[in-house]
Amino acid sequence: MTTDDRYRQAQAALDAGDPGSAVALWRPLADAGEREAMYRLGRAYMYGDGVNLDYAAAHRWLEAAAEAGHAAAQKEFGKLYDRGWGVEQNLNKALEWYQKSAEQGYAEAQHNLGAMAYFGLGQPKDVTQAAIWYRRAAKQGLAVSQFSLAALLLEGDGVDRDPKEAATWLEKAVTGGYAPAMVNLADLLLSGDGIAPDPERAEALLIRAAAQGQPQARFRLGVLALAQGDAAKADPVAALVWFTLAADLGHEEAIKAAKRLSESMSSDSREAARAQVATYRQTHQTSR
């Protein structure tokens, strides 16, 4: 069996939900010094995917692949030190390996460097540098970086405030299915900050994000249902439904809002809301 055949069979095993068979196919390649196989085997041990979780084995295989110049392995090896998984946490080492990976153009490592610069981890806080790294990863299509860059542009933090450009990056992140970006883009569509107002699309985005378990999206939908206190347009039952669903996810404001609203409603309205909440939880398998 050729090396390419082994990789193809391993991928087929992964697609079939059988990571253990994939590991068995990678192992002889890793033993032979194939850096891609060493990376994949190390990552399997790192997350317990097809093998028992074993940080020592993860460290050994990822280090070998990282030293061989494998960008993804360098990023994961850095993460071991970043999180202190199986080793003493060492942010300087994490930065060193993220940097090696990022310089090869690996987007996830670029994002991690941005986050460490933003939060001042292992180095002085530098939001301008964070924006640089976020932008590099965002240009490669990494949704979390597109979202993070947009947040800086909205705040004018480390960059000039530019809600129009922020909206552009949020649109890209939404296209990638990133739920937090749906919430932020919905806020812009409601406020008209840097983008033409579109309340209907904003609500649709919040509903999508809510279905993905975003508590802030659910809370926002509850607020929208109250129609800023306009009794003719308000739907308190819908508001209670969304506040309750946001409360399921620990949203503090939603917990308080649900309590206040429930106390002001008739028993029939509360029962209607409970029925809708039960249906939503069942349909979306919402944890409580």
Image (tube, rainbow, N blue to C red):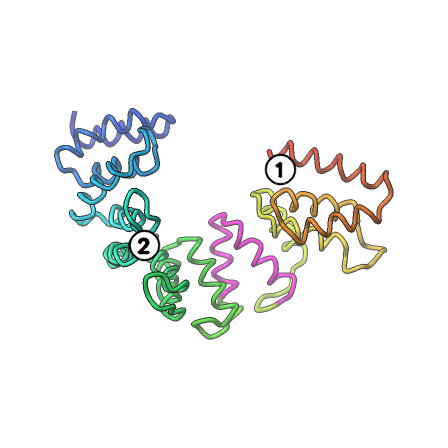
Return the residue at label 1. 288
First to last magenta residue range? 166-192
SS for dot 1: loop
- Image quadrant where residue 185 sits: bottom right
Return the residue at label 2. 109
Q: Position of residue 113 (x, y in %)?
A: 34, 59
Specify the principal SS of the magenta part.
Answer: helix
> Is 73 displayed left or right of 193 in the figure?
left
- Image quadrant where residue 101 sits: bottom left
Mark in the foreground, 1 or 2:
1
For the point 70% across and 34% down, which residue is it? Answer: 278
For the point 39% across and 54% down, which residue is it? Answer: 141
Q: How many marks?
A: 2
Mark 1 crowd level (few <14, some 14–19, many ≥20, 10 Å Cα): few
SS for dot 2: helix
Q: Is residue 174 above or below residue 11?
A: below
Residue type for callout 2? Ala
